[in-house]
Image (cartoon, rainbow, N blue to C red):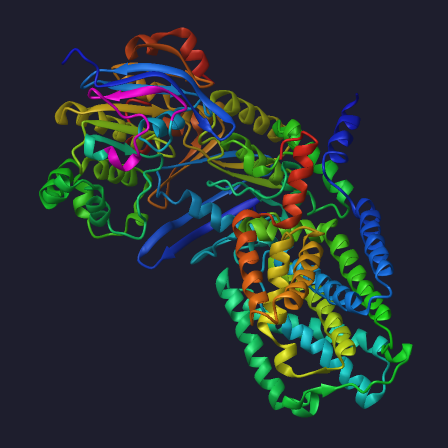
Amino acid sequence: MTLSPVLQVEGLDAGYGDISVLRDVGFEVAQGEIAAIVGANGAGKTTLLSALAGLLTPRRGRVTFAGEVISGRKAHELPGRGLALVPEGGRLFPYLSIEENLELGAYTPSARAKGRERMDEVMKIFPVLRERGKQLAGRLSGGERQMCAIARALMCRPSLLLLDEPSVGLSPLMSERVLDTIAKLARTEGLTAIIVEQRVTEVLEIADRAHILDHGRIVRSGAAAELLRDRQIQETYMGL
Amino acid sequence: MSKADRLRAWAKPRGVPTFAFELPINLAVLATLAALVWAFRADGFSLNILAGAFLFAGLATSWNIVGGFCGQFSLGHSVFFATGAYTTANLYLKFHVSPWLALVPSAFLSAGIAVAVSWPVFRLRGPFFAFATMAFTEVLLSLAMYFDSVTGGSRGVSVPFRAGFANMIFRDRLSYAVLMLGFLAVSLIVLSAIARSRLGYRLQAIRDNEDAARAAGIDVLREKLVAMALSAALTGIGGALFLMYVRVADPPTLFSLFDVGVKMALITLIGGIGTIYGPLLGALFVVVLENFLRAELGGSIPGGNLIVLGFILIGTALFLRRGIYGALTGLVARFAGKPT
Amino acid sequence: MSAFLQIDGVSKQFGGLRAVDQVAFSVEAGELVCLIGANGAGKTTLFNLLTGQLAPSAGRILFEGRDVSRHAPDRRARLGFGRTFQISQTLTSMSVLENGMVGAFLHHRSIKAAADAAALALELVGLGPRASDRAGALTLGERRRLEVARALAMEPRIVLLDEVMAGLNQTEVTEIVDLVRRLNGQGLTFLVIEHNLKVVRAFSRRVIVLNRGALLAEGRAEEVLNDPAVIESYIGRRRS
């Protein structure tokens, strides 16, 4: 593992129109790390990922990725630099086939050149996609859709993967499978992953570090295992 | 405060106006317009413009019932306009029925045709519904040209000038302006009554989300037909009044998509679709502007008035998304410091 | 004597796909039944069959002895079926109170009566203070609660909740669980689709498990959630 963090977020302020969502958010993610960002609904998790992925321009602060400042860059410039987003719900193109969705994931010229080869590699990771290759993406079940969305993001060989609530709407079994797959991918493909999740227990079990977002601020950061055992966190986020 | 008081405080002042609340506002607006008519009582040219503006205000207001509140973008309302005109004309000319009385069957027949035509068409969603209504207009225009015993074919129908209140034919322009204001009054009050009633809420629910409306127990088709019938009835009355005003009209004029059917929709959009006073504002703006432009530019640049009107339509679409009414309420809210 | 709600061998076929396969169970008046199962197991399809968005390919649905299998959704709503949708269907141009009123108009004629009834329903779900806000401006959690309020304003005989907890934070989940328990205590019948196992355990009543469109298990929560077949197909070993 290299010493310098692959992603650095400093003093980030972001919001929509008159509404300010993120306030002074700062954290770091090391190379190869799986970082979890957890928090209540409305805390700003999706806003944070949108800001990282270039879908939202931050009002203040800076995001540095692999030594380069990316805050303020447009979203379509980022896959070429190695950053890919799996949006909430996957956002597949429902009337296109799985293969076509994957093809569209190969957005950069270099990825397009190796398109077929990369698709084979990706389908090896997700065999169910090879089986259903020509089926319309809209017909997939929740878990399969999430897998396809992750596969699509992998098509341009990212080094950093951002995932927005990959387990939303999935059964406990499927969400376990999806999170396990992400964990495995990070190890085998050498990916760094930032996972935003509401299912705190599940994501803390596979993450290395975790950050808790509350009302737009990071209120706690630490090793995932430590936070998992923390009584207060258990009560606030995991209990009923 | 007790729980009951708290609930009551939520229910009333917090933006649930009733018809009793709206009616005085209607009357105030109408009184203002009446004062306007009185101010121009000696100016025949202006009275003519006002009459036209009020007529279209009434038509747009009636269109708004089904187009704005119910979200069914009908471009076929000229069919009802024509139906009203021909019913009244034929009853007056052939059976010597006073046009005032003929308004009733005109309204009913327009409503009846609306229900018959809409029943199959309401299955269609979005733009397809609009296309279908346009198609109906063209079909019925052709039929109207064919059945010339009723419509006078291409010669049109012509009402001879025989002044008299019972004939709804007046010598002076002032009476016509008042007549059209009366039509606007009826339209406005009917729209207010609908908007501030169970029917109004159901129509808006249908506009926003038909499936959610059904899940809330609303018989969507039935409510759409009721809205259409009411809207068509008023449009039919407008058509009848129009014919008694101009006293000569042929099918292309009455069935005209651009000058009647589409115009009603455009005026409502410009003024503020889905609001009570939007169509009225739109009509005052568009009709007055049209006439002004025709007078100023119509001579020097042929069609100049239409070009300018076109730009204004584009301008409002781009910048006044919620129409004139929306822009005005936005200004008022900002002035009063409330969040819009 | 037939049950309050009886589902008699109901099936739904979409071309070659059997989304619901001869499902049969009954719900007694005043019960609180949870319906669980993986995505694609047929839960929402079953709900759509119950509330009338779809008609069954085979079988019958009896409500208080009356065959409602082919009744349109609005007719069933008038008979007492209230439901929420998986993707929130609020009426965005209208205010929060007006949304509630649309439901209240089912049994009230005048605006004042409907407004009062709607205000009561809003208070039950905790949306009272937001009564005059545009429904489109609400957060996801608030929109879900608004849908529940609209259903309650209809004074239903049975309420069907479709994943109403998805995307809600811990506090909101607890509030809705309490609300449902309270209303059920007063005799309102509930049929609830849920992925959140903590919620299912918290309700700890009868649970019905669907898998691939068919009934897999049925019984008290404690038994069903420990059933090996259910764990295998739905819960996953880690979560059981």
Q: Residue C47: x, y in percent?
A: 48, 45
Along the viewing direction, whichever of A204 and B62 lies nearer the viewer: B62
Instruction: For the C terminus of chain C, give its image quadrant.
Output: top left
A152 lies left or right of C101: left
Q: Say whether residue A77 is magenta.
A: yes
In percent of width and height, residue A187 lies at: 15, 22
Q: Which residues are magenta?
A: A58-78
Residue B269 at what x, y percent from top left?
A: 60, 56
Classify residue B260 by image quadrant: bottom right
Quarter residue B90 falls in: bottom right
- Residue A111 sits in quarter: top left
Q: Is residue C136 left or right of residue C230?
A: right
Q: Nearer the viewer, residue A58 or C157?
A: A58
Residue A80 position (above or below residue A131): above
Q: Is residue C93 magenta?
A: no
Residue B118 lies left or right of residue A104; in this view the side is right
* Residue at position x 60%, y 73% in the image: B117
Residue at image location 27% in from the left, 40% down from the top = A144
Q: In the displayed structure, would residue A47 be above or below residue B153?
A: above
> Residue B310's spot in the image, x, y percent?
54, 61
Q: Residue furthest bottom?
A: B149
Q: Give above or below for B14 relative to B55.
A: above
**Camera-side residue of A230 and A11:** A11
Q: Could you tell me if residue B303 is visible in this image?
A: yes
Tell how many labels: 0
Q: Is residue C71 visible?
A: no
Residue, x 72% and y 73% (percent of image)? B239
